[in-house]
Amino acid sequence: MLRLAPAALRFRAALPATLLCAALPATLLCAALPAAAADYTIMAPAAPGGGWDQTARAMQGALVADGIAGTVEVVNVPGAGGTVGLQQFYRQAKGDPDALIVGGSVMVGAIISNHSPIDLDMVTPIARLTGEPEAIVVPAASDVETMADLVTRMKADPQWVVWAGGSLGGPDQILAAEVAKAAGVDPTQIDYLAYAGGGEALAALLESGGRARVTVGVSGLGEFADAIRAGQLRLLAVSGAARAAGFDAPTLREAGIDVTLENWRMVAAAPGLTAAQEQAIAADIARLAASEAWRSALAAHGWTDRYLAGPAFAAELRDEVARTRQILNELDLR
């Protein structure tokens, strides 16, 4: 149930120095203004409200706040686990040193599941940025109060439990299948509804109120955090190795499900860049990752700093693609 927005949504974070100078009275000396830093357009290949959108906007704010960039624009292009946006980015941004795209584990799985003709090797991966645990939630009115309740329902009738999460082949679907498998339920029998992002999965959960088609939601904890704190959703468990700070919920392992999983996110640049252009972008992202504004964004969203760049990230990305392909094959999710 992937939904494509009718048009890309654009947001600008700052006024370019040239326009600011033109707006000043002639009596002021425009030359006194500092030269503008690099400008960027960041594609979030998902609908507003989800993890990629949150990441792109956190980057937007931090790049401008710390003077790394003068103007940063975020463009939302949802669809097919980020592969719609990835293909558009590949076609339209070639050789553009101002173009960035957010991706991560969701996109890796979607590329495989959707047999995308464009993969991450065809753009310019720059760095891994964040990691966060997945959250398993139900509407506050649901009579499913614990993971034990959910497992009991799954064992009685796997298709009674309808999961709402992100794109096919991504960490949300993988986690739902892994939970079923660990509970002794055939993962190919679960009913999983794929949405364009965590924001749409959240909307489906809140609409259901525990009474309609969607039973349980799975996504990055940050995408559900506000609704959990507002009492709209009940957090059953998190998928990390440790409990999430500020939330009263067990890990899956503490709840008797021997599964751990982390949803990670990255940034890539356009294809066809020169070595000097790639190095300049990598330097800006390194400054971003070390900035106070970015540290504040990590804390606000509950993300873990997973910054990794250069050859180490390239090797990790290759390994992650291979691991995801193996998991999807084993769970028959391709």
Image (tube, rainbow, N blue to C red):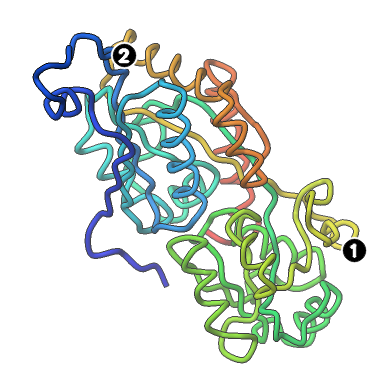
Residue located 69% across and 60% down the image: 135
Which residue is most to the front?
27
- The answer to which of 314 and 281 lies nearer the viewer is 281
Mark 2: which secondary structure? Answer: helix
Q: Which amino acid lies under the numbered mark 2 shown in the image of this protein?
A: Gln
Residue 120, visible in the rendered structure: yes
Q: Quadrant of the N terminus?
A: bottom left
Residue located 19% across and 9% down the image: 31
- Residue 17: % across, % down: 22, 23
**In the drawing, what numbered circle is on residue 256?**
1
- The answer to which of 282 and 184 lies nearer the viewer is 282
Residue 329, visible in the rendered structure: no
- Residue 128: % across, % down: 55, 30
User: Image quarter for residue 27?
Assistant: top left
Mark 2 and mark 1 in contact? Answer it, CB < 8 Å.
no
Determine crowd level at label 1: few under 14, some 14-19, many 20+ residues with C-alpha closer than 10 A: some
Camera-near label (2 vs 1) is 2
Residue located 33% across and 41% down the image: 118
Residue 42 lies left or right of residue 299; in this view the side is: left
**In the drawing, what numbered circle is on residue 95?**
none
Residue located 56% across and 25% down the image: 289
Determine crowd level at label 2: few under 14, some 14-19, many 20+ residues with C-alpha closer than 10 A: some
| Nearest to N terminus: mark 2 or mark 1 | 1
**In the drawing, what numbered circle is on residue 277?**
2
Image position of 74 with respect to 8: above or below: above
Mark 1: which secondary structure? Answer: loop
